[in-house]
Amino acid sequence: MTQAPGAQATRSVARGTDDVPWLDTMVLPAASVLAIVVGYPVVYTLLLSTQDYNLLGTTPQRFVGDDNYRKLLLDPTFWLSLRNTAIYTFGSVAIAALLGLALALLTENIGGRHGRAARALLLTPWAVPFVVVAFLFRYMYLQNGGAINALLLAIGIIDAPISWLNVSSLALPAVMVTNVWTMTPFFFLLLAAALAGIPNEVIESARVDRARGASLIVHIKLPFLRNALLVSSLLMIIANFNDFAKIWAMTQGGPGYSTTTLVVYVYRLAFENFSIGYASAIGVVWLLLLLAFAVAYLRALRMT
Amino acid sequence: MGTGLPRRSVHVGRVVQGVAIALALFWSLAPLYWMLATSFKTELEAASLAPTLWPHEVTVANYVGLWSGSLPFLDFFANTLFTCLATAIVAVVIATPAAYALSRARFRLRGTIGYAMLLFRMLPLVVLLAPLYLLLLHARLLDTHAGLVVGFVTFGLPFAVWMLKGFIDAVPIEIEEAARVDGYTRWEIVRKVVVPLILPGLLTTATFVFMEAWNNLIYPLTFVTTLEKQTLPAALVLTFTGQFKTDWGGMMAAATLTTLPLMIAFFAVQRSMVRGLTTGAVAGA
């Protein structure tokens, strides 16, 4: 294992008398690496957000106070991308969680080789890299010769092929379907594990009380799944707030700004317009939103 | 009513269940089948306006094209494999002692550090993007694989600490006490007692970090500027406008190869994955 330089010294200092030490030498390697690659950038972002800073150096870097933050309040694209982020995140997580739950309940009582095979196959979408998923769906969404249009035409759901990713009102839902496809196995896996963890006696005694079918699921099983659902959706909500690969590889935020989420907007601002200061201000606001959300969520979790 | 439902309703239930599972399997597997099938189609057939269910004229030209084409796909593959493996190893090695301390040791900042790990995990990567870019620029690590690994570590390390703590929590403390009596130091206990015991957990964690790095697009796209040094996901995005504009067969062949390592890694650790994810989930709390 990596021995932290100066570990012994720190330890004897930290220990003092018989008191509990402030730090433990063993967390030092990880803590110092994170201080440099995460802590420092976060602080630096705060600083950058108060500056007018162009990466190309066309204008001199200067302190502008809260100008970036004022600009943000009046920036319609910021609000639009905030809205898109919320729809994209909560919409796809909710649908994927429901589908995952349905799959977990559906496959619960299939044992043996068939059950194992079915479960493994249902998990495969999760093991496909995001960029691959994005291009695969882009190909299937094609207006001319796309598999999805061909299928929907064959079943008779649509009359004419649709250019899914090029219509502003359809692009976001289309990307969300893709997202749900990759995410459902995650919920399926965690919820199936939670279902298997329900003590047999609970199910048996409910059976004796004549609970079955829907009422067995709603009154007995769902309460047991509450924690697993909360934890898995928290993980996925965070992952989706940060999702860049799928959206960028499918639409680059277009058409127009219809699929531009905060990640895409900040990326564009920083590395296409090179306005680092303004991009940082949005990053800070977003960070605060995420923190507030995470704290509220952990509270809810703690209460169970 | 008694214990069982009437026979016919059980039968209907079975059929409904079977149909639902068949639909779910179709939904999960059809896109993957489509990727595989397209990768064996000729360029003409893949772009056909009337899509064919299976390749009418099977060809491996798309795969051969990846090797002999104008783009260094082998390099992209090697770049991705190298940076992701390096990230997984670095993250797990640094995270293990920290996870052990957070699980076992008593110190005042324990709660704070535990929370920090959880919060770091939630950080939007794009917030770190500009300052990390400048940091790597000044450290002359921009456009290097080492720089990319530094980027990947920003999310890999907090995750590894968080997940490993869950695995270490599950190890009974009595085992360590015996080692302590034998005069082992704490570092020796971690290395010789804890690590062998949580080996499946270490592998699972490393695999997860590996998969997340493999999935990452934003860092290579920003930190790597030379195409030859690029990772597969970023290369797919960057070259799509060029080589693959209409060559969906070639695209799907590249996509299949990008998927394979991740698929193998995923199924190798699938069993211990659930435990790792759920036990670590409330770490820091």
Image (tube, rainbow, N blue to C red):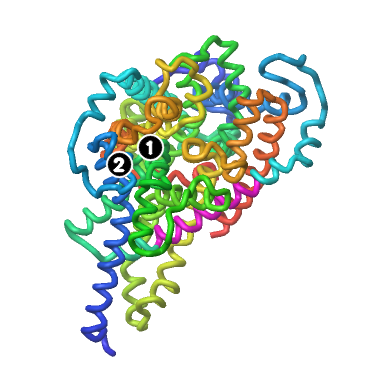
Q: Which residue is mark 1?
A: A132
Residue A90 x/y as whole percent: 55, 53
Q: Are marks 1 and 2 in contact (CB under 8 Å)?
A: yes
**In the rendered structure, the residue with mark 1 lies on which chain?**
A
Task: Say what secondary structure mark 1 lies in.
Answer: helix
Side of A133 relative to B36 (left or right)? right
The chain carrying label 2 is B
How crowded pointer 2 is (Cα within 10 Å; few <14, some 14-19, many 20+) is rated as: many
Residue B105, percent across and down?
Answer: 49, 34
Residue A283 in view in this figure: yes
Q: Residue placed at 26% from the left, 51% from the top?
A: A121
Residue shown at the point (82%, 25%) measured from the top left: A64
Query: Compared with residue B46, is residue A207 higher up or lower down, i.e. above or below?
Result: below
Give the alpha-carbon distance from disc 1 to disc 2, as whole Å. 9 Å
Q: Position of residue A295 (x, y in %)?
A: 63, 48
Quadrant hosting residue B48: top left
In the rendered view, would you say B24 is above or below A30?
Answer: below
The quarter of the picture where the N terminus of chain A appears is: top left
Amino acid type, mark 1: Val
- Hey, which quadrant is residue A225 in on the image? bottom left
Residue type at numbered disc 2: Met
Up-down relation of residue B219 to residue A294 (above or below): above
Q: Which residues are magenta?
A: A82-101
Residue sitting at the far bottom: B1
Residue bearing the label numbered 2: B35
User: Mark 1 Cα within 10 Å, few/some/many (few <14, many 20+)?
Assistant: many
